[in-house]
Structures are given as structure tokens and as C-alpha cells.
């Protein structure tokens, strides 16, 4: 059964007003190039896929994404579109050509495996894993990395159109989670598609994105994002959750423990995380607020407590996880609510 999850984001002024200006630039600014990119993955951003990491636009070891936030890592050269877990990868998520062009290179046959579980030397010089390189003319290329083994459906020299399937999201190459690494270049130099051709280095200001307007609206910048959340009656196992094999509610347990958990991209030290459990009538069963002690590009958060009679209340439990980032003149809030788990 597919779990229903509601997602709520709040932008508190005046920071929201400044951020809205950035969004307006993303949506309205005309690109200074003759190319525009469509979404390179068959999903709905914020629902079943998420931008895990942006291009690092800072010079030197300091990390900055195009919005001057920390949603990147040092010298990251692409945009990473993550899917929820390995179960989603096994079901299949298509990778799509972002613009018309000609396939210049392909690679397939590499295993889908977390590179942390293997000798890193086995993916040296092949960090992209299974991939496709498309030439769009006028010096533009796009590269699609970490495709699932056996999924590449195009050949070198083949012409492709926007939205045409190239392969599927996988776990090949130098990666620890299933995602598409999408890299754009012009004349051999990395271009952040959120910034445009005139902004190869540095953040802030008014970007001139090379996404289509519809895609720019879908990819509004989010400083921190909860991408998976759930309830369980035993301690959640992050590895099983990310593998898509975690069973949220086991019969036969007698300790009446209830856990609320969330997987998050972009946690920063000082972020406030609130776990709230209620019944369907709104009665508060527990509330726990914590402050993140350190930065975590990808973090797993959980809280549990014994709730008398929880076994009988399983179908009435409603959990909410809220993460809030305080800024000098406002705040950003991301909230997810998950209904009772299926047994």
C-alpha cells in the first residue's frame, strides 16, 4: 500500500520576500543562451524525487550552492536528483534527455552497488558509472550518470528529443544512494543550470536559469528538505528504510513503543526539529523538539516513546515532523505529516 504523506512548507517574511525575488529570477529571467533544459528525470519534484545536491559554485574549499546555501559539497559539478529509496530504483525511474541532441558516448554494464561497500579503486576513472553523454550543438553537452545496469536504451550517434528515455536511475559508479547526476557544460566548462552561462562561479544576485519556465517552477530552491517520513512500533533501521525493505509496523510487539522518523537533505547545525504524535482527534501523545548539533548533507532523525495502548491505537496515530531553520531576518520551515502505518 502506498503511504500518503502530506508536505507543507512555510516561508516567513522578510526572508521569504528576498527568497521570492530569487525564485522570480529563476522563473522569469530569460536565459542568455539559445538552449533550455527540460526535467531530466521522470518524476514530480518534492513528491517522488528531490534535488539532493546542487553545483558547488564557490571557489576553493568553501561550499556554496547557487542560492548561497549549503546544499552541495566541495567541487560538486552537477545537480543530483534523488529518488526515495532502492525500492523505487528497482521499480524503475526513467532518465530523460533534457534537450534535443546526438548521443556521443554511452556506458553500461557496471554493477548497482554502494561504492562504500566496495574497493573505491574499482570505480576510479569511472565515477559516473553507467551513463550517457549528449551533444546539443553550439558547445553544449549534458551528462547523465549512475544509471541502472542494463537500462541504457540509446546508442552512440543516435539523435534524441527532449523527454526521450535514455535509461533508468541506478546505483552505479561513485554513489551511495540512487540518483541521477545531471551535469551541463558549455565549451567544456561546467554551467550550473540554475545560474546560467554568465554565472559560472559565485552565488546570489539574479540568476538566468537555463531550465524551461515550467521546470524552474518545479525546482524552487529549498534550504532543507524532508524527503521521507514514517511511523513504526520498533526502532527504525535507516539502512532498511533506504533500501525500501523496512516494515513499519510489526504484530506481536508488546512494549507499546511508537517511533517517528524522517530522512532529510541539507540539515545544518542549529536547525530545530520537532516530532509530534497525535491521535486522529488531535489529542497530543508526545512532542519532542531537538536542535541539530552539526551539518549533515543527508541525515536520519528519529524519536520514540512508549504510548500506553498504542497497539490498539495503530489506526488512529498521526505523526508530524517539522524542521525549521532560523535566519537573520526570518525562517524556513518544512513539515511532513504521515498517517497511520499499514501493518
Image: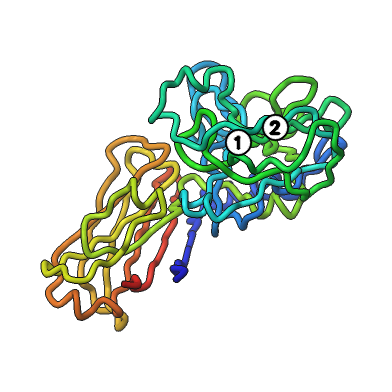
| Residue 320 x %, y % | 34, 65
| Residue 177 x %, y % | 47, 40
- Residue at point 77% right, 50% down? 163
Q: Are marks 1 and 2 in contact (CB under 8 Å)?
A: yes
Circle on res. 181: 1
Q: Is residue 259 left or right of residue 199?
A: left
- Residue at point 35% right, 62% down? 230
> Split into 4 quadrants, where in the image is the C terminus?
bottom left
The answer to which of marks 1 and 2 sits earlier in the sequence is 2
Circle on res. 143: 2
Quarter-of-image position of residue 265 = top left
Q: Relative to 304, is 63 above or below?
A: above
Q: Is residue 30 left or right of residue 267?
A: right
| Residue 114 x %, y % | 44, 34
Which residue lies most toward the bottom here? 281
Looking at the picture, tell me which residue is in the foreground, 256 or 119. 119
Q: CA distance from mark 1 to mark 2?
A: 8 Å
Amino acid at each position: 500500500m502506498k503511504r500518503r504523506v502530506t508536505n507543507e512548507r512555510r516561508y516567513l517574511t522578510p526572508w521569504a520576500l528576498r527568497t521570492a525575488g530569487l525564485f522570480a529570477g529563476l522563473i522569469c529571467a530569460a536565459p542568455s543562451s539559445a538552449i533550455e533544459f527540460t526535467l531530466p528525470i521522470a518524476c514530480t519534484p518534492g513528491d517522488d524525487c528531490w534535488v539532493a545536491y546542487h553545483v558547488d559554485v564557490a571557489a576553493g574549499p568553501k561550499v556554496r550552492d547557487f542560492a548561497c546555501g549549503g546544499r552541495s559539497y566541495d567541487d560538486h559539478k552537477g545537480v543530483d536528483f534523488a529518488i526515495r529509496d532502492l525500492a523505487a530504483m528497482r521499480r524503475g525511474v526513467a532518465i530523460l534527455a533534457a534537450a534535443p541532441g546526438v548521443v556521443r558516448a554511452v556506458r553500461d554494464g557496471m554493477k548497482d552497488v554502494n561504492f562504500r561497500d566496495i574497493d573505491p579503486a574499482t570505480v576510479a576513472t569511472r565515477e559516473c558509472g553507467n551513463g550517457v553523454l549528449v551533444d546539443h550543438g553550439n558547445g553544449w553537452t549534458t551528462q547523465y550518470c549512475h544509471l541502472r545496469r542494463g537500462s541504457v536504451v540509446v546508442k552512440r550517434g543516435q539523435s534524441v528529443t527532449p523527454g526521450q528515455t535514455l535509461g533508468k536511475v541506478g546505483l552505479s559508479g561513485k554513489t551511495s544512494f540512487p540518483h541521477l547526476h545531471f551535469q551541463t557544460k558549455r565549451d567544456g566548462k561546467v554551467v550550473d543550470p540554475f545560474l546560467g552561462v554568465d554565472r559560472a562561479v559565485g552565488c546570489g544576485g539574479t540568476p538566468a536559469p537555463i531550465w524551461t519556465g515550467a521546470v524552474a517552477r518545479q525546482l524552487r530552491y529549498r534550504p532543507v528538505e524532508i524527503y521521507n517520513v514514517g511511523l513504526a512500533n520498533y526502532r527504525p533501521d535507516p539502512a532498511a528504510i533506504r533500501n525500501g525493505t523496512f516494515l513499519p509496523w510489526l504484530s506481536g510487539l508488546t512494549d507499546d513503543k511508537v517511533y517517528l522518523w524522517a530522512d532529510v537533505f541539507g540539515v545544518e547545525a542549529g536547525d530545530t526539529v520537532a516530532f509530534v504524535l497525535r491521535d486522529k482527534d488531535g489529542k497530543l501523545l508526545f512532542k519532542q523538539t531537538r536542535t541539530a548539533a552539526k551539518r549533515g548533507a543527508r541525515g536520519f532523525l528519529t524519536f520514540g516513546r512508549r504510548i500506553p495502548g498504542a497497539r490498539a491505537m495503530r489506526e488512529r496515530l498521526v505523526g508530524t515532523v517539522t524542521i525549521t531553520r532560523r535566519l537573520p531576518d526570518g525562517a524556513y520551515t518544512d513539515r511532513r505529516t504521515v498517517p497511520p502505518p499499514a501493518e
